[in-house]
Image: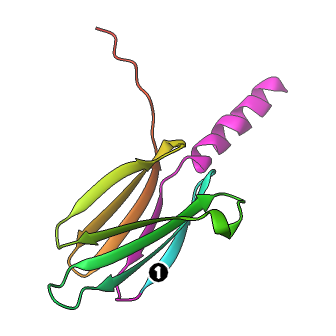
Amino acid sequence: MKSLALAALLAAAPVATLADTLTLAQPRAGGTLHTNTVDMSVYRTDAETDGAFEVVARYIDAGSDADAAKTLRMRLEDGDSVAFGLPGHSGTSWSFTRAGDALTVTSAPLYSQLALN
């Protein structure tokens, strides 16, 4: 019985750690990404003068009051990509990538690896 329970737990574990991806292909498009600890809403507009994307992301701790939301703002030109972690939320990497007319936002788990030489 323990073997069956352990096998079921191991089979379910990868589902909780899959990357979440959002692609915004239209101006004024938006969407939401969720992790175990963060909810993030992202939208993009086109800059009026130079064609860059103006990206706004608002994030909160999962289950928190909306008044606690924090804001990220960035400008991305074609080919730009940035990846980072959020303060106080270890274990997840967020990446924003612009390719042509599309903005792709991805949340992915971070794994620590020990290098033994």
Vertical order, 34 against 77 (above or below): above
What residue occupies the far top of the structure in this picture?
Answer: 117
Which residue lies at the image location 61% right of the left edge and 48% below the top edge?
16
The local crowd at label 1, few if under 14, some if 14 to 19, many if 20 or more residues have their Cα within 10 Å, is: some
Compared across the picture, whether 72 is left or right of 98 comes to right
Residue 88 image point, x, y percent = 54, 43
Q: Amino acid at mark 1?
A: Gly
Which residue lies at the image location 70% right of the left edge and 60% below the top edge?
64
Quadrant holding the N terminus: top right
Indicate the quadrant where residue 46 lies.
bottom left
Q: Nearer the viewer, residue 16 or 38?
A: 38
Residue 51 image point, x, y percent = 18, 85
Membership of 47 in magenta stretch: no
Vertical order, 54 against 82 (above or below): below
Q: Nearer the viewer, residue 62 or 22?
A: 62
Compared across the picture, whether 12 is left or right of 47 comes to right
Membership of 23 in magenta stretch: yes
Vertical order, 34 against 13 (above or below): below
Indicate the quadrant where residue 89 lies.
top right
Which residue lies at the image location 31% right of the left edge and 68% below the top edge?
74
Residue 109 image point, x, y percent = 48, 44
Q: Nearer the viewer, residue 86 or 33?
A: 86
What residue occupies the far right of the structure in this picture?
Answer: 1
Q: Which residue is mark 1?
A: 30
Which residue lies at the image location 17% right of the left edge and 73% below the top edge?
78
Compared across the picture, whether 61 is left or right of 75 comes to right
Q: Which residues are magenta?
A: 1-28
Indicate the quadrant where residue 65 lies.
bottom right
